[in-house]
Amino acid sequence: MKLNKEIVSYLIFGVLTTLVNIVTFWLFDDILEMDYKLATTIAWIVSVLFAFITNKLYVFNSKDMQIQAVLKELATFMFFRFLSYLLDLATMIVCVELLKIDNLLAKILANVLVVIFNYFASKFVIFKSAKGRLK
């Protein structure tokens, strides 16, 4: 039962993280008229911080707040999220500059790839050791 709750929580917070990413991108790209690459970077930072906090506290119920534990979790999380940022940015560049796709549509397509990548990274690497804590 707990595993199903975690899967549902992961999906809910994943959708919210994606929305945070897209809305933040839209705000900086369309409203503030920043370069789409800078807007993508800012959106990534905001959404990764949101994802870390929600995954730690609500999805995987990691209540260890000792600085070493939090820094270790954050470092692993950030490493894989940085890889997904590179995937996000590369997808944006290919879609916008090479394929001439609208910025917002390109951002949505990039997020599909990022969500798939993050799911597999979280399931098989980042939170793999958390299985023992979930019992």
Image: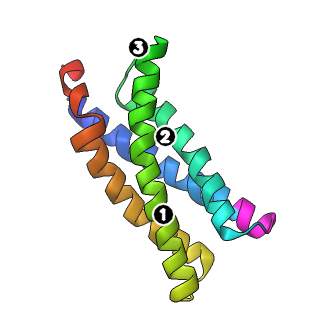
Which of 25 and 90 lies nearest the eye of the viewer? 90
Q: Which quadrant: the N terminus?
A: top left
Q: Earlier in the sequence, mark 3 or mark 2?
A: 2
- SS type, badge 1: helix
Determine which of the numbered discs, if any, sits on residue 51 in the image: 2
When the figure is inspected, residue 123 is found, relative to residue 36, above or below; the finding is above
- The quarter holding residue 115 reads bottom left
Mark 3, secondary structure of its residue: loop
**Can you say whether 74 is above or below 96 in the image?**
above
- With 108 as the anchor, is 60 left or right in this view? left
Which residues, given as a range, are shown in magenta? Answer: 27-33
Hey, what amino acid is under mark 3? Asp
Q: Quadrant of the C terminus?
A: top left
Whether 35 is drawn above or below 28: the answer is below
Residue drawn at (30%, 42%) of the image: 122
The secondary structure that dominates the magenta segment is helix
The residue under label 1 is 88
Per the image, the residue denoted by label 3 is 64
Q: Nearer the viewer, residue 98 or 18?
A: 98
Nearer the viewer's eye, disc 1 or disc 2? 1
Q: How is the image coloured?
A: rainbow
Q: Nearer the viewer, residue 93 or 65?
A: 93
